[in-house]
Structures are given as C-alpha cells and as structure tokens.
Image (spheres, helix red, strand yellow):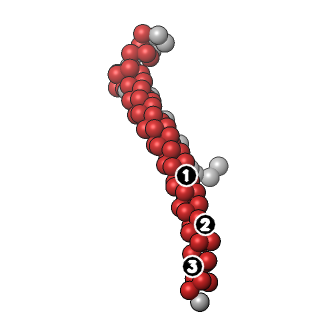
Amino acid sequence: MSRKVLLFCLVTAPLFLFIVVAQSVNFQSVEKRIQTRERLQSTLVERNQQLLTGISVLSSPERIGNLAQDHLGLKQLKSEQSLKLRFDGGTP
C-alpha cells in the first residue's frame, strides 16, 4: 500500500507543480491586461473631462450672446419692440 501512495505522490507532484506554474503565468497575463486597460480608462476619463469643460465654455450664454451680436449682427430687442402672438385652439 505504501508503494502505491509513494508512486501516486511521485506522479502527481510534478503535475500539481505544472498547474501552479500555469496558473501563475495566466495570472500575470491577466494582471498585465488589467493594468493596460486601467491606464486606458484613466486617459479616457481625463479626455472626457476636457471635452466636458470645452462644451461648457462653448455653450456659455455670454459667448453665445457675443457671437450673435458680433458675427451675426443680431441685437437684443427691447420689450416694446417685441410682438407676442397667441393662438387659441378653437374650432374653425
């Protein structure tokens, strides 16, 4: 019986060692991919923040007003210059 146990241990020990090494290599590969994707995510988050800042600057009311007056020749109307129309939803 002890010979069978010894033979079993001699056969399975290298197999277990191989499995442990394979798992270690796989873990390192996955870890490297995770780090690469984390760097990419960080870069994309930073770029997104820059774009959001740009959008808020470009859509500010002051900038839109200046563009309308300076480049399009539009001017703000006074209340007496405006005309309001109201349509009733009555039947003809």
Q: Is residue 17 visible?
A: yes
Say which residue label 3 marks: 6
The kind of residue on which mark 3 rests is Leu
Q: Nearer the viewer, mark 3 or mark 2?
A: 3
Image location (x, y in percent) of residue 70: 42, 10
Decide if residue 73 is on the left or right side of residue 91. left
Front of the two marks 3 and 1: 3
Counting residues from the start of the chain, the first of labels 2 and 1 encountered is 2
Secondary element at image label 2 = helix
Q: Quadrant of residue 48?
A: top left
Residue in front for this viewpoint, 53 or 15: 15
Q: Position of residue 44 (x, y in %)?
A: 47, 36
C-alpha distance separating marks 2 and 1: 15 Å
Q: Are marks 2 and 1 in contact (CB under 8 Å)?
A: no
**10 Å neighbourhood of mark 1: few (<14), some, or many (≥20)?**
few
Please tell me whether mark 3 sits on a helix, a strand or a loop: helix
Asked whether the beta carbons under mark 3 and mark 2 sit within 8 Å of each other, the answer is: no
Classify the position of the N terminus by image quarter.
bottom right
Q: Is residue 34 above or below residue 61?
A: below
- The residue shown at (38%, 15%) is 66
Q: Amino acid at mark 1?
A: Val
Q: Residue furthest right?
A: 92
Q: What residue is shown with label 1?
A: 25
Residue underneath mark 2: 15
The image shows residue 16, relative to residue 45, as above or below, that is below
Question: What amino acid is labelled 2 in the image?
Answer: Leu
Question: Residue placed at 55% from the left, 48% from the top?
Answer: 29
